[in-house]
């Protein structure tokens, strides 16, 4: 079992839709969590950090549930430019970043 | 714009050859990671360093892979001898205080 697990998708949604991704982690000692975005044939880039209180950045909302050990990302009013792979990341103690497989999102006109 | 720089961007080599990938982390970042990405396995952590000291290389096949940081501006990942199953994109990333940035990767093809 992978330490960080995600539904690989693909998620195919129309423009303007709201889409949610979930991710689970197995190491309860993990302290920090992040969502990264990776475009085709590019490097992963930090999208946002995830806090227990929940945090929002424009159309993106991230949530962490420590009791259930899952992380979520909500994208509202999706744009064509949101098409990418979204990677859930946990800090497995001491700054060691462990990535999930990624969830592919395709936003269609 | 500060960025992580990796060389080469692309490498095609024959099985059995030595491959060396280089990374220049962002100045001032104290943590450096090497990841390998394939379609099947996703992003796998091979090794990481903090303040140039290796902290964890348990993800790396030790018989053929080696990672070093000869100084704060250079990290290297070597494969000797290379095998076709090593074909992947190798990313270097550097970070400090929880923010990590990736290089553009080295796309390795071993034929």
Image (tube, coloured by chain):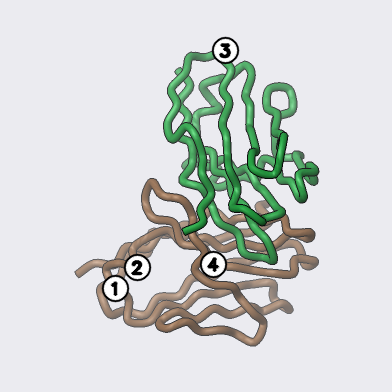
Chain colours: A brown, B green
For the point 64% across and 39% down, which residue is it? B74
Q: Is residue A10 above or below residue B74?
A: below
Quadrant the C terminus of chain A occupies: bottom left
Q: Are marks 3 and 2 in contact (CB under 8 Å)?
A: no
Q: Is residue B37 above or below residue A94?
A: above
For the point 54% across and 78% down, which residue is it? A62
Label whose residue precedes the other's in the sequence (1 or 4)? 4
For the point 76% across and 39% down, which residue is it? B58
Q: Are marks 1 and 2 in contact (CB under 8 Å)?
A: yes
Q: Judge left or right: residue A21 versus residue A54.
A: left
Mark 4, other Cα within 10 Å: few <14 / some 14–19 / many ≥20:
many
The residue tagged 3 is B16
The residue tagged 4 is A35
The residue tagged 2 is A82
Q: Secondary structure at mark 4?
A: strand
Q: Which mark is residue B34?
A: none
């Amino acid at each position: 079992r992978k330490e960080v697990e995600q539904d690989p998708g693909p998620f195919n949604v129309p423009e303007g839709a709201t889409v949610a991704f979930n991710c689970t982690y197995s190491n309860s000692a993990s302290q920090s969590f992040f969502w990264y975005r990776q475009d085709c044939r590019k490097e992963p880039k930090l999208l946002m950090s995830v806090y227990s209180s929940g945090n929002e950045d424009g159309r993106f909302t991230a949530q962490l549930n420590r009791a259930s050990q899952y992380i979520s990302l909500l994208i509202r009013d999706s744009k064509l430019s949101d098409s990418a792979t979204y990677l859930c990341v946990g800090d497995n103690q001491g700054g060691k970043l462990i990535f999930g497989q990624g969830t592919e999102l395709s936003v269609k006109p | 714009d500060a960025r992580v720089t990796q060389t080469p961007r692309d490498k095609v080599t024959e099985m059995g050859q030595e491959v060396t990938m280089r990374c220049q982390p962002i100045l001032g970042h104290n943590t450096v990671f090497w990841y390998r990405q394939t379609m099947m396995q996703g992003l796998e952590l091979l090794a990481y360093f903090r303040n140039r000291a290796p902290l964890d290389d348990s993800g790396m096949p030790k018989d053929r892979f080696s990672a070093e940081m000869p100084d704060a501006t250079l990290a290297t990942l070597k494969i000797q001898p290379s095998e076709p199953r090593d074909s992947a994109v190798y990313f270097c990333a550097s970070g400090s205080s929880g923010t990590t940035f990736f290089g553009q990767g080295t796309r390795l093809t071993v034929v």
